[in-house]
Image (cartoon, helix red, strand yellow):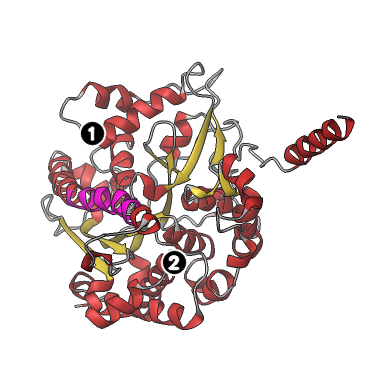
């Protein structure tokens, strides 16, 4: 009996010692919050990019896009990369976007060695079939923050915080709040809502939250600080909740902001992969517009006046349909069924979001033109309007880059890459080259060079 008790106590002690670290990654707001809208120095043409999720596959493909934009020149002979004003990113795409936001164009050549060439798959717990992983699985995920965020920080981000991001482009890293099911972005409106300091959050923690695929990774924890918060909830939250015509996703985001301020309902957020809610990350652009204090948001009034054309391109690294079970009467087996259902759960709302976002951009352009045309000439001139400026002279171009742009054979090759944190070197080569080629041939980008 004593041996049994001793053994039980030993197991309990071992379990307690192995409990995952759920320390919140954030701190209370201690100074003025970061501005929602800031000047990006837009002059005429601007580019916005959305990097999809997809592990190292997405990170490599989106890296190729940035490399090609660096090499393509606009009409003035400047790199198209200089025209990028905003990047919103999810999961694997968030690694690329965050590194670019930290290191800038001069850091592009070092990204592959820092992030893509490491074989760190073996450092992770990757299967729930191992009895040693069952406890981890029951505690919320096979890998805790010590595995993912610490690796990202050590190898890529070197202890840098969100305040260390460069002023341009604006980088939006997207995750999902498990409790509300709403998108959560590492951007000022969300951190105002939880009354927390965005600048002191490690970049690695933000990217880890965006990459925390359920089961494989534990959620990343944030704490809310509603008590004694010096900021009230922004008026747009109540306005959208009352507006019966507001987009449903925006209403859900506003409702989640209400929850963040209700200590009886929520005191912590548990963030998982951004692809669970929006694998393109475009919903954060909609929220930034609502929270930015004017139709020009998420751009500043000066940028909005000087904007001539916004080229918004989604970089989609999703895998094509594969498998041979559709030829069999029995259909998919258990693992295939789970994988297929999860793929549908991520990809179906993503495609719907892309269609809805294109409509949003049309409406945003109309509101922007109306705002510009209501400016007095003196106001427009003070904001940077030139002598040939016309208030209606704004064009929005929307497009999606994907593997399918490269032909069937290449699409099959790139789409075969697993959604994993590490990939073979030759496949990374092909993914980067694919991102370059799809960008070089894209009409929306080519129009900026002519």
Residue 428 belongs to magenta span = no
Q: Which residue is rendered at x = 12% and y = 41% of the image?
A: 370
* Distance between the alpha carbons at the discs numbered 1 and 2: 30 Å
Residue 341 belongs to magenta span = yes
- Residue 300 spot, x, y in % from top left: 32, 46
Label located before the other in sequence (1 or 2): 2
Residue indicated by mark 1: 248
Q: Is 313 on the left or on the right of 159, as rendered?
A: left
Q: Which residue is rendered at x = 18% and y = 47% of the image?
A: 356
Please tell me how crowded label 2 is: few (under 14), some (14-19), or many (20+) other residues with Cα within 10 Å: many
Q: Which residue is rendered at x = 58% and y = 40% of the image?
A: 138
- Residue 350 spot, x, y in % from top left: 27, 51
Q: Main secondary structure of the magenta part?
A: helix
Q: Which label belongs to residue 179?
A: none
- Residue 148 spot, x, y in % from top left: 59, 55
Question: Is residue 300 visible to the viewer in this orientation of the structure?
Answer: no
Q: Which residues are magenta?
A: 340-355
Residue indicated by mark 2: 59
The quarter of the image holding the N terminus is top right
The quarter of the image holding the C terminus is bottom left
Give whichever of 143, 116 is nearer the camera: 143
* Circle 1 SS class: helix
- Residue 166 spot, x, y in % from top left: 50, 57
- Rendered position, 409 above or below 18: below
* Circle 2 SS class: helix
Give whichever of 165, 131 is nearer the camera: 131
């Amino acid at each position: 009996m004593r041996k049994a008790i001793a053994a039980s106590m030993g197991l309990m002690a071992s379990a307690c010692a192995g409990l995952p670290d759920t320390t919140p990654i954030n701190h209370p707001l201690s100074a003025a919050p970061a501005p929602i809208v800031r000047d990006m120095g837009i002059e005429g043409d601007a580019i916005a990019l959305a990097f999809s999720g997809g592990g190292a596959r997405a990170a490599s493909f989106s890296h190729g896009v940035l490399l090609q934009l660096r090499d393509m020149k606009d009409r003035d002979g400047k790199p198209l990369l200089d025209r990028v004003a905003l990047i919103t990113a999810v999961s694997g795409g968030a690694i690329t976007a965050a590194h670019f936001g930290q290191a800038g164009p001069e850091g592009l050549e070092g990204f592959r060695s820092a992030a893509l060439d490491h074989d760190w798959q073996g450092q992770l717990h990757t299967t729930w079939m191992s009895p040693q992983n069952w406890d981890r699985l029951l505690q919320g995920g096979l890998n805790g923050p010590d595995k993912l965020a610490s690796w990202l920080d050590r190898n890529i981000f070197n202890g840098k915080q969100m305040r260390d991001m460069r002023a341009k482009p604006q980088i939006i890293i997207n995750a999902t709040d498990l409790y509300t099911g709403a998108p959560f972005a590492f951007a000022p409106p969300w951190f105002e809502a939880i009354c927390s300091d965005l600048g002191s959050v490690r970049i690695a923690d933000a990217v880890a939250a965006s990459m925390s695929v359920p089961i494989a990774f534990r959620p990343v924890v944030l704490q809310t600080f509603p008590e004694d918060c010096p900021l009230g909830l922004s008026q747009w939250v109540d306005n959208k909740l009352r507006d019966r015509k507001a987009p449903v996703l925006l209403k859900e985001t506003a409702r989640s902001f209400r929850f963040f301020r209700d200590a009886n309902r929520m005191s912590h957020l548990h963030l998982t992969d951004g692809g669970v809610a929006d694998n393109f990350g475009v919903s954060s652009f909609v929220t930034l517009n609502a929270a930015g204090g004017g139709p020009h948001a998420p751009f500043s009034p000066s940028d909005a006046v000087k904007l001539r054309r916004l080229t918004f391109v989604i970089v989609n690294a999703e895998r094509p349909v594969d498998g041979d079970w559709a030829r069999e009467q029995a259909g998919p087996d258990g693992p295939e069924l789970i994988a297929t259902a999860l793929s549908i759960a991520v990809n179906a709302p993503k495609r719907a979001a892309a269609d809805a976002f294109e409509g949003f951009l049309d409406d945003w352009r109309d509101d922007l033109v109306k705002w510009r045309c209501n400016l007095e000439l003196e106001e427009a001139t003070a904001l940077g309007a030139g002598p040939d400026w016309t208030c209606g002279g704004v064009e929005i171009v929307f497009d999606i880059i994907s593997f399918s742009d490269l032909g069937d054979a290449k699409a099959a090759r790139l789409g075969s890459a697993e959604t994993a944190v590490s990939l073979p070197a030759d496949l990374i080569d092909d993914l980067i080259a694919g991102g370059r080629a799809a960008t070089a041939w894209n009409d929306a980008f080519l129009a900026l060079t002519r």
